[in-house]
Image: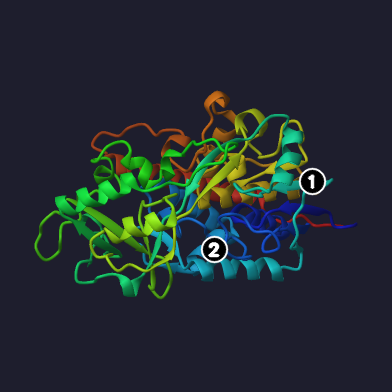
Amino acid sequence: MTTPTLTVIGAGMAGSDAAFAAAKLGVKVALYEMRPAKMTPAHRTGSFAELVCSNSFGGEGEANAKGLLQREMLAAGGLVMTSAHATRVPAGGALAVDREAFSARVTEALCEHPNITVHTEELTELPDGVVVVASGPLTSDALAESLRKSVGEDFLGFYDAAAPVIDIDSIDMGIAYRKGRYDQAADYLNLPFTKEQYDAWYDALTRARQHTPHDWEKLEFFEGCMPIEELARRGPDTPRFGPLKPVGLEHPETGERPYAVAQLRQEDARGQMWSLVGFQTGLKWGDQKEVVRLIPGLQNAEVVRYGVMHRNTYLNAPRLLTPHLNLRAHPRLFVAGVLAGTEGYLESSATGWLAGTNAARQLLGLAPVLPPETSMLGGLVRYLASANPDNFQPMNANWSLVPALPKVRGEGKKERRARAFRRGLEAFEGWLQEVTTPPVLS
């Protein structure tokens, strides 16, 4: 019997996990990635699963919705999550990685897998056969047009923005102090503002020049990745109650609470690069540098990577997708990642894993599978397929995606979420044993 072949378009978070999951089930995979032959406005390398925004996959632990999805993908052997754990860097209660080591590990695993053939070229049209489209938020114009013709309606779009990254040697360590919020692990560098310093910084931020969108770009931000300059437009106290919130970050020597605090998170294993937490921005680079250097402790900051803004493209999933992640009108076409209406690295990789699994099963003559509704992945894909299509927005992992547990007297929210975590993980692990055994090809 000839081994069936699956086409996967895109080697970002979603495409990498889709290709790897399908290959593990025994199908041949043709993996297409246009970089580095054709670059995007946000990417800088040709490496697979390149991190273009934060280097964090979100919080861990039983009280965290992303923590549950992380554990589900570890149980499934997802390439992105196993690679993330192998290349992690300190980040308090979050899972953050050395971005270069992480991408290198993913790239090596895909290039060396015997069932995967990598093609470094742009696909301008959807090919025949079973396909996973995981071309991401920056899908090329030609492929986007081909997909548009297939789905029969326009894409939706929103802007995403990345935060500046600072060289450690240019940070004034006489001002910065290490501390985690509420005395968690001291994995963050904290830069305290006085009121006078904050007012000067806020004034510069509100005067700074922004990226000017093209006429065809619709300016619509996803709330979870709101640029700092957009937060500032809501009023001078908005950043202080958001990413610059000083609560729980009292100075370890004086015990005093600053007026505001900017935090830096480690970006690489050696601790040489640090990103400004919550400072996603689309400011012009010259203005960006001025705003960054008005932060106490960053007066001589060397910005090794400026924040960038780019347009994310995604489908109206509730109108178009099944919970198995294929198109209702074209069952051979599977969609994963941001293009399917998810938000976040972790969510992209998880939907990629499921799309790759179901696409492989279709090629093998097997029925598609759907994770339990109590699992985070199961809740996420059910949402994508059933949300209100008239005002659909990208979704990330959160506890509202899974059925609520009945309240127990004396139990707090944290304890109830921990029960939901254990319930979801147990259901997911049991489900995995039934659906991921590679079939015997005769």
Quadrant occupied by the N terminus? bottom right
The residue that appears at 56% across and 60% down in the rendered structure is 80
Q: Amino acid under label 2?
A: Thr
Secondary structure at badge 2 equals helix
Looking at the rendered structure, the kind of residue marked 1 is Glu
Which residue corresponds to mark 1?
Answer: 125
The span from disc 1 to disc 2 (Cα, nearest Å) is 32 Å
Residue 393 lies left or right of residue 60; in this view the side is right
Which residue is rendered at x = 65% and y = 54% of the image? Answer: 15
Label 2 crowding class (10 Å Cα cut-off): few <14, some 14-19, many 20+?
Answer: some
Where residue 156 sits in the image (x, y, percent)? 59, 34
Please name whichever residue, 242 or 412, is drawn nearer the observer in this view of the structure: 242
Relative vertical location of residue 47 with respect to residue 287 in this rendering, above or below? below
In the displayed structure image, the side of residue 177 where residue 278 appears, left or right: right
How far across and down, in percent of the image, does residue 199 sit? 20, 48
Pair 1/2: label in front: 1
- Earlier in the chain: of badge 1 and badge 2, it is 2
List x then y, in percent, for residue 142.
Answer: 74, 45
Q: Is residue 345 visible in the rendered structure shown here?
A: yes
Instruction: Please name the residue shown 43% across and 45% down the image.
Output: 225
Question: Which numbered marker is on residue 82?
Answer: 2
Residue 279 lies left or right of residue 177; in this view the side is: right
Q: Tag 1: Cα neighbours inside 10 Å, few (<14), some, or many (≥20)?
A: few
Residue sitting nearer the eye, 188 or 116:
188
The picture places residue 384, in percent across and down from the top left corner, at: 57, 35
Q: For the residue labelled by badge 1, is the local secondary structure a helix, a strand or a loop?
A: loop
Q: Quadrant of the C terminus?
A: bottom right
Closer to us: 118 or 410: 118
Is residue 367 among the parts visible in the rendering?
Answer: no
Q: Quadrant of residue 439?
A: bottom right
